[in-house]
Image: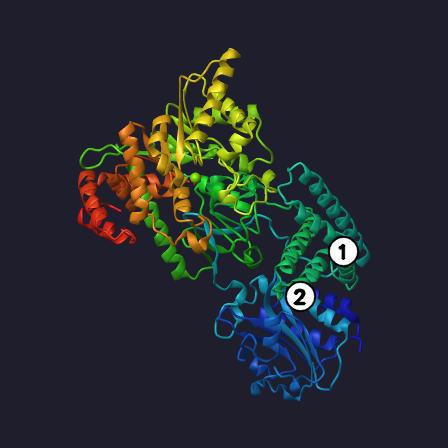
């Protein structure tokens, strides 16, 4: 049976109703009457999903009107609940014999045999269910189902506009505005409260019904052509690494952009009376419903690709740029995106950014490096966040726990705001210590230096009052660049770092690539055990051109200044000596070329491979200084991958079995008068730093944010007393046990501020 007047007429009528100046309830009542009559159905009902879970009957033609705002269905309950749970339409000629059928006496619905229901969808969320029913048994046509789905889109816009917010039965908010707690992975610490800003803003499909179908078809064709051309251009750019997108993803985009089935569905949707934008949204809603239930990760990825390409098409139609212009950023912005390149994050105005929430952070998480350097809390791996949020939603990003609170209720928001205030107060207190010398109660100076890796880290030197950069991770800049940095680019970068450091020294670490720090253009280095593979100094010695180029660039950048360089992942003294010979060759080369040299050159070794513990005297003798990389030392000593969450937290840095080798290194430094710094994460944690001072460490390099808390600890510590207590603990303790608890107790006894 065909609907009289067809879907186009219905849509036109609905549009008129939408524009009428009546109350939301009156409008809904008119809409259900119109749909019922157009589809020759005795019943038409709209259920809206409420924030507290159930679907509430908001309007009906044909069922008992008294039931409006009283009848509710839980998701999964009855046919309506089934449609909401599956996000799929359902057409039945014998509804009462369907296993999910549930009888609600107040609606008087038992006399209706046929049932057609569709979900009301918007951006992947089910906002409600729209139903028509007939007394007689009948089979609904494809066309009728389509018409009802299109009508549901209009209702989705109405629900999303907030118009229905005030008319719900028990005053419960509708689901679209409900509070949601999402769990992700913290990638940059801090706490951010603000408003959602979509990095790729969605195009609001304002107009759903077409005035002129031929015109809309023409717009659609032109937009498809333009979108295809833009994808092709991206693929061309990906060849030279400029697009920021992975080529496989782009190829998938190209496939979808030429997919006949997809294009046919788009054209059909326009022919049925939709605008080109509404057609894209409509076809996307269907695809989402189909693909969202897939458990196969490959197919779910295709949904992402399909969403991306539909989004591109919508932007093309609206004539808007795909990503937000960084200059358009509002205050208190929390950027939400499926993924984002580090360069894109750097483009935004830092002073307006409060946080970043992503679905995926991407390989080795370069965005995390940038977010940390900028001091912006960030969380990744949040399933579906870019689809769930609405522009301007209130949102909280917790970079400690990885939790994201979307549209938080007032009490949750208040408690986070309090947490943020406390944090800010503590930060202020730490800032107040900026110029206080870092000396223990018994007069032992403790050097608290700063770790850095990007130019954007450098302003933190001033803010923290750190006396120097104790570790500059040169590879970070390489990880962000599309290709290997040549001599001049490297020299310019190091020069800028030195200039930004002013009088303070900078300890540059030569490239530490491989393992958890892959370069985008080295991906094909497919190793079974990358952490134990060809990395850092091993690459430098096997491909001297890289190491020599870097040393040459450093020598040029530091002309007339003190140059400190160290090399990572040294496993044997021989490796260190070979690297030093390369430095000597570069110095000779510079001399022969008549170039000026740095005022002084110090060449150090990182102690982070356990084999050096048994060559510790030899390395302390030949190196100008030692720097303990406790992150890697811990990983290799316990054979526990530092980035594998299953094992990374299994061993404690405060166990005797780790403190003993750390003491071995500090003692060797003393014996040979070779300065020792510790630059791993543990130095930035007050309790661990206290133990390290007790072991004999006097120099640390740490993240800028850690300097304040560690300095507060240092100022309250008696280093001599701590040493006596720790010596006793080490002598007495069971070597298999962690000393965390006794050290905590000791800190309390000695009133050390942690
Ligand atoms: C370390 O290993 O402790 C270290 C400081 O270097 P990275 O974390 O860069 O490996
Ligand atoms: Mg390391």
Which of the two discs, 1 and 2, labels the residue nearer the N terminus?
A: 1
Mark 2 neighbour density, 10 Å: few (under 14) some (14–19) many (20 or more): some
- Which residue has dot 2 on it? 290
Question: Which residue is painted at 67% across and 84% down in the image?
Answer: 95
Crowd around label 1: few <14 · some 14–19 · many ≥20 (10 Å)? few
Q: Is residue 345 left or right of residue 472?
A: right
Position above or below: 500 against 282: above
Q: Is residue 516 visible?
A: no
Real-space Cα separation, disc 1 to disc 2, in angstroms? 17 Å
Judged from the image, the quadrant occupied by ligand 2 is top left
Q: Is residue 653 left or right of residue 520?
A: left
Q: Is residue 580 left or right of residue 161?
A: left
Q: Residue at x 33, y 39 (%)?
A: 707
Residue wearing tag 1: 259
Q: Quadrant of residue 237?
A: top right
Numbered label tally: 2
SS class of the residue under badge 2? helix
Q: Nearer the viewer, residue 86 or 576?
A: 576
At x 76%, y 50%, the residue is 224
**Which label was assigned to residue 584?**
none
């Amino acid at each position: 049976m065909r609907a009289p007047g067809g879907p186009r007429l219905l849509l036109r009528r609905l549009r008129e109703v939408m524009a009428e100046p009546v109350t939301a309830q009156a409008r809904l009542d008119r809409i259900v009457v119109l749909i019922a009559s157009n589809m020759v159905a005795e019943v038409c009902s709209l259920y809206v999903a409420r924030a507290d879970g159930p679907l509430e009957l908001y309007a009906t033609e044909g069922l008992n009107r008294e039931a409006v705002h009283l009848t509710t269905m839980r998701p999964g309950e009855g046919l309506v609940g089934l449609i909401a749970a599956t996000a799929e339409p359902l057409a039945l000629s014998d509804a009462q014999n369907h296993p999910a059928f549930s009888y609600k006496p107040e609606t008087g619905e038992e006399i209706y045999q046929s049932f057609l229901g569709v979900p009301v969808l918007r951006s992947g969320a089910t906002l409600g269910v729209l139903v028509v029913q007939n007394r007689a048994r009948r089979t609904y046509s494809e066309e009728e189902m389509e018409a009802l789905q299109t009508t549901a889109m209009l209702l989705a816009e109405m629900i999303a506009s907030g118009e229905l917010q005030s008319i719900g039965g028990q005053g419960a908010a509708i689901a679209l505005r409900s509070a949601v707690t999402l769990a992700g992975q913290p990638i940059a610490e801090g706490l951010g409260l603000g408003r959602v800003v979509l990095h790729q803003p969605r195009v609001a499909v304002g107009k759903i019904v077409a005035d002129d179908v031929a015109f809309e078809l023409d717009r659609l064709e032109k937009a498809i052509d333009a979108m295809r051309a833009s994808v092709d251009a991206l693929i061309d750019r990906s060849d030279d690494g400029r697009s920021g997108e992975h080529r496989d993803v782009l190829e998938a985009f190209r496939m979808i952009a030429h997919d006949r089935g997809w294009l046919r569905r788009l054209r059909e949707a326009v022919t049925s009376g939709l605008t080109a934008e509404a057609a894209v949204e409509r076809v996307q809603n269907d695809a989402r419903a189909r693909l969202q239930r897939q458990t196969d990760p490959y197919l779910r990825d295709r949904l992402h690709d399909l969403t991306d390409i539909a989004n591109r098409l919508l932007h093309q139609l609206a004539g808007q740029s795909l990503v937000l212009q960084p200059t358009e950023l509002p205050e208190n912005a929390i950027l939400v995106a499926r993924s984002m390149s580090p360069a894109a994050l750097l483009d935004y105005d830092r002073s307006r950014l409060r946080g970043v929430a992503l679905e995926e952070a991407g390989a080795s998480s370069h965005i995390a490096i940038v977010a940390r350097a900028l001091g912006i809390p960030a969380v990744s791996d949040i399933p579906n966040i870019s689809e769930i949020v609405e522009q301007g939603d209130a949102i909280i990003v917790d970079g400690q726990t990885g939790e994201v609170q979307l549209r938080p209720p007032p009490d949750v928001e208040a408690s986070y705001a309090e947490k943020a205030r406390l944090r800010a107060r503590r930060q202020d207190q730490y800032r107040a210590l900026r110029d206080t010398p870092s000396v223990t109660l018994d007069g032992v100076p403790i050097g608290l230096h700063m770790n850095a890796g990007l130019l954007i880290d450098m302003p933190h030197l001033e803010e923290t009052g750190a006396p120097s950069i104790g570790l500059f991770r040169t590879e970070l800049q390489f990880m962000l660049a599309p290709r290997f940095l040549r001599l001049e680019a490297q020299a310019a970068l190091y020069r800028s770092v030195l200039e930004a450091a002013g009088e303070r020294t900078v300890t540059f670490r030569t490239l530490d690539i491989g393992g958890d720090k892959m370069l985008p253009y080295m991906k094909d280095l497919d190793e079974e055990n990358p952490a134990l593979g060809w990395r850092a100094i091993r690459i430098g010695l096997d491909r001297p051109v890289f190491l020599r180029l870097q040393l040459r660039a450093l020598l040029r950048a530091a002309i007339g200044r003190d140059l400190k360089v160290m090399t990572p992942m040294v496993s044997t003294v021989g490796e260190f000596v070979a690297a030093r010979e390369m430095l000597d060759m570069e110095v000779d080369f510079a001399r022969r070329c008549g170039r000026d040299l740095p005022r002084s050159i110090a060449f150090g070794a990182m102690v982070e491979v356990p084999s050096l513990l048994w060559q510790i005297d030899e390395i302390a003798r030949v190196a100008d200084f030692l720097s303990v990389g406790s992150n890697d030392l811990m990983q290799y000593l316990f054979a526990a991958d530092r980035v594998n969450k299953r094992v990374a937290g299994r061993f404690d840095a405060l166990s005797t079995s780790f403190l003993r080798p750390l003491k071995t290194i500090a003692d060797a430094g003393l014996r040979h008068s070779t300065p020792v710094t510790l630059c791993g994460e543990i130095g930035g944690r007050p309790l661990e730093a206290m133990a390290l001072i007790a072991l004999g460490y006097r120099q640390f390099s740490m993240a800028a944010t850690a300097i304040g808390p560690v300095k507060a600890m240092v100022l309250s510590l008696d280093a001599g007393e701590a040493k006596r207590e720790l010596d006793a603990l080490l002598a007495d303790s069971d070597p298999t046990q962690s000393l965390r608890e006794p050290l905590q107790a000791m800190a309390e006894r000695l009133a050390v501020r942690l």
